[in-house]
Image (cartoon, rainbow, N blue to C red):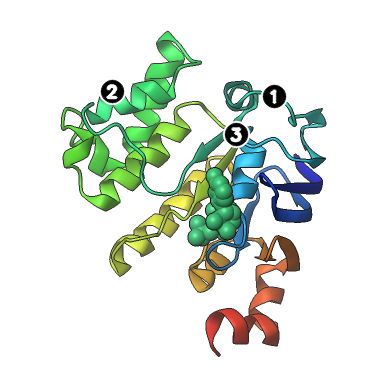
Amino acid sequence: MLEITGIHAGYGQMAVLRGIDMRIGPGEIVALLGSNGVGKTTLNNVISGFIVPSAGEVRFDGERLTGRRPREIVAMGIAQVPEGRKVFPNLTVAENLELGAFRRAGARKRQNFDRICAIFPRLSERLEQLAGTLSGGEQQMLAIGRGLMSEPRLLILDEPSLGLSPLLVEEMFALVTRINAEGVAVLLVEQNVMQSLGVAGRAYVLEQGQLVMQGTAAEMLADPKLRQAYLGL
Ligand SMILES: Nc1ncnc2c1ncn2[C@@H]1O[C@H](COP(=O)(O)OP(=O)(O)OP(=O)(O)O)[C@@H](O)[C@H]1O
């Protein structure tokens, strides 16, 4: 479904991504693992159209995404939930969700709204609350809910577990599985290696702008290099 080929990208003179090849199939959960500053967010922004790569291309269902505007990419079926719970603090939960549905009207919008309330009961109990007064975990759920309002076939989650308490981290990963069970493919960008490999079918490891490891979650977990470098085992 998503095919990334030979992507090079950076900021000005600084090269960040140096030849990335990646595939995500329909209905998969794929984890993109790597420590701080290796280029994970940069790759997300290339997929979402916020950064134009200097070389390579991204295709979705065979159609070229590279060079398209972010809103066109959303309309094609890819939603990105950026790192850091970027909700509109002075709008209510319901209004934040509505904003995610800019390309849907009427009955479809209502259906999506109801579906998201069913996935996130915590949000459905707080629809009229200002988003800025939600807890950190609730804001993260709202950001994901807003992404789902555009009915994506691929949802990109950038560090959804960041800053959450251990219990909420568990809940977040369970939510990822639930969203995926509804047919949405997920690219899960995470530093939380163990839990990501618990829900993902496959994973890639990014180091200094290059993919250094890839395989099924089971292969990754059994790999001595990964265990040592990322799990300290
Ligand atoms: N707008 C920008 N201008 C210049 N450099 C940038 C910009 N955004 C990111 N960088 C740099 O690009 C490199 C990769 O950043 P990126 O945010 O992609 O990493 P990351 O793997 O997502 O890290 P983290 O897990 O810490 O979010 C870093 O060295 C960062 O400082």
Q: Earlier in the sequence, mark 3 or mark 1?
A: 3
Secondary structure of the residue carrying tag 2 is helix
Under mark 1, the amino acid is Arg
Q: Quadrant of residue 225?
A: bottom right
Where residue 138 appears, as percent x and y from the top left, is 27, 46
Q: Residue furthest bottom?
A: 233
Which residue position holds label 1?
68
Pointer 2 and pointer 1: residues touching (CB < 8 Å)? no
- At 71% across and 67% down in the image, what residue appears? 216
Q: Quadrant of residue 188?
A: bottom right
Q: Which of marks 2 and 1 is nearer the N terminus?
A: 1
Image quadrant occupied by the N terminus: top right
Residue 186 to residue 215: above or below:
above
Q: Which of 155 and 17 is in front in this view?
A: 17
Under mark 2, the amino acid is Glu
- At 26% across and 51% down in the image, what residue appears? 136
- At 71% across and 75% down in the image, what residue appears? 219
Secondary structure of the residue carrying tag 1 is loop
Q: Earlier in the sequence, mark 3 or mark 2?
A: 3
Tell me the mark number nearer the camera, choosing from 2 and 1: 1
Under mark 3, the amino acid is Phe
Which residue position holds label 3?
50
- Looking at the image, residue 174 sits to the left or right of residue 221; the answer is left
> Residue 95, labelled with which disc?
2
